[in-house]
Amino acid sequence: DGGITQSPKYLFRKEGQNVTLSCEQNLNHDAMYWYRQDPGQGLRLIYYSQIVNDFQKGDIAEGYSVSREKKESFPLTVTSAQKNPTAFYLCASRMGDETQYFGPGTRLLVL
Amino acid sequence: GQNIDQPTEMTATEGAIVQINCTYQTSGFNGLFWYQQHAGEAPTFLSYNVLDGLEEKGRFSSFLSRSKGYSYLLLKELQMKDSASYLCAVRDRGTYKYIFGTGTRLKVLA
């Protein structure tokens, strides 16, 4: 089946710890995106990548890092510099002028 | 700058019609998108407008006026399962970034 997968579904972070959220797609899409959603809010863009080995900061990139070494993978690391990481994280991908499609999301909680 | 406004909450009755409005300001427009998001789940794509006019998809229709910076999503024959948040998003022409509104939470009552 073609689609976007995110893992894990729930992730717990301790103070001062870096955690990495996985996003994989087998749709052969060129572009991939990471968003953060807080309760009752819209989506805010963290990072995006139009093609392999290239990515740009979104509106709230501080405290996050990404890599795009393979077309199908776009992992997001939440670093200890992100002081308020509790949120719902959504990965999406897009081909050409089509809409973007979302993965199921990862909910990050701080212990 | 870029800004998107949509109502925070709406309530409607099962079987009725509801219109959710979205107004936007953007420097480079490359399409307006509507997504449905049920509580605790990821958004799913509903419709896309890049030219002025109405796009119809079953019970859902979306309208765009680029000169007015205005769109609406029309839901007909409302069902209980339509209770969800509806997100309006504009795509930027140069960067292909999506700017989202805060979403409209729709409650469908029996």
Image (spheres, coloured by chain):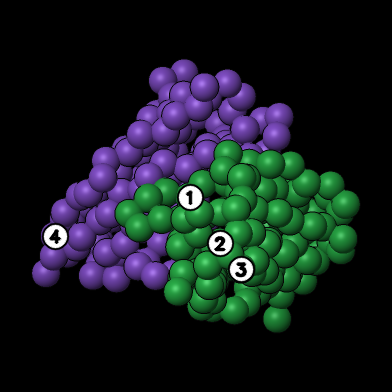
Q: Residues within 10 Å of mark 4 (few under 14, many from 20)?
A: some
- Which residue is denoted by mark 4 in the rendering? B13
Extreme front residue here?
Answer: A16
Same-subunit check for callouts 2 and 1: yes
Residue at horizontal 52 percent and vertical 22 percent from the top: B1
Where is residue B75 drawn, in percent x and y? 31, 53
Q: Chain of mark 3?
A: A
| Left or right: A38 in relation to A94 | left
Q: Secondary structure at mark 4?
A: strand
- Which residue is denoted by mark 2 in the rendering? A90
Q: Which circle marks residue B39 in the picture? A: none
Q: Residues within 10 Å of mark 3 (few under 14, many from 20)?
A: few
| Left or right: A70 in relation to A20 | right
- How far, Cα to Cα, is label 4 from label 1? 28 Å
Q: Residues within 10 Å of mark 2 (few under 14, many from 20)?
A: many
For the residues labelled 4 and 2, say whether their Cβ atoms are less than 8 Å apart: no
Where is residue B73 drawn, in percent x and y? 36, 45
Residue at horizontal 74 percent and vertical 56 percent from the top: A66
- Which residue is denoted by mark 3 in the rendering? A17
- How far, Cα to Cα, is label 3 from label 4? 47 Å
Chain B rendering hue: purple
Q: Nearer the viewer, mark 4 or mark 1?
A: 1
- How far, Cα to Cα, is label 3 from label 2? 20 Å
Q: Earlier in the sequence, mark 3 or mark 2?
A: 3
- How far, Cα to Cα, is label 1 from label 3? 24 Å
The amino acid at mark 2 is: Leu
